[in-house]
């Protein structure tokens, strides 16, 4: 399963359901986009290291941005920006899940529910 950035944020804020979801998932993935978003939220090098240590300790695998993911993400932006306000970062995360034939876990249903070929597991904090 691929985890959206919001799931990590919920877990960092102490949300037990988010932590359990991660812990109960055997194969854990995140997109390079999510990784960059997590690092952007860090306020210093200590927090950067915390993010890296967290991902390593939970055995997360980072999925790279490929040409196919970039192409699919650009199509999602073209198709869904006006109707559901999808942003480029969310489009990349969704395209990463679709291109890797994986389910995406997110509480951000507004942007993701319109993508018909995306397998979405809605997280409710």
Image (cartoon, grey):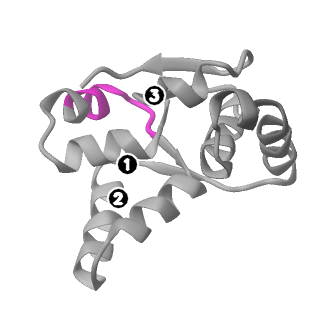
Q: Which mark is residue 59?
A: 1
**What residue do we see at 25% from left, 41% from top?**
10
Using a 10 Å C-alpha cutoff, classify the residue at mark 3 as few (fewer than 14 neighbours), some (14 to 19) or many (20 or more): many
Q: Is residue 25 magenta?
A: yes
Q: Is the residue under label 2 in contact with that under label 1 (CB below 8 Å)?
A: yes
Q: Is residue 111 left or right of residue 26?
A: right
- Gap between marks 1 and 3 measured at Cα: 17 Å
88 versus 4 height, above or below: below
**What residue do we see at 30% from left, 34% from top?**
22
Q: Is residue 40 left or right of residue 24?
A: right
Q: Is residue 29 magenta?
A: no
Can you tell which quarter of the image residue 124 is in?
top left
Q: Is the residue under label 3 in contact with that under label 2 (CB below 8 Å)?
A: no
- What stretch of residues is rendered in magenta? 20-28
Q: Earlier in the sequence, mark 2 or mark 3?
A: 2
Residue with the most extreme bottom position: 45
Q: Is residue 63 left or right of residue 69?
A: left
């Amino acid at each position: 399963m691929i985890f959206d950035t919001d799931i990590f944020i919920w877990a960092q804020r102490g949300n037990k359901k988010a932590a359990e979801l991660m812990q109960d998932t055997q194969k854990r993935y995140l997109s390079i986009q999510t990784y960059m978003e997590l690092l952007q939220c860090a306020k210093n090098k200590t927090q950067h290291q915390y993010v890296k240590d967290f991902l390593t300790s939970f055995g997360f695998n980072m999925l790279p941005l490929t040409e196919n993911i970039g192409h699919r993400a650009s199509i999602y932006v073209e198709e869904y920006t006006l109707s559901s306000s999808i942003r480029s970062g969310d489009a990349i995360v969704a395209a990463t899940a679709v291109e890797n034939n994986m389910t995406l876990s997110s509480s951000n249903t507004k942007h993701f529910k319109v993508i018909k070929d995306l397998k979405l597991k809605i997280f409710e904090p």
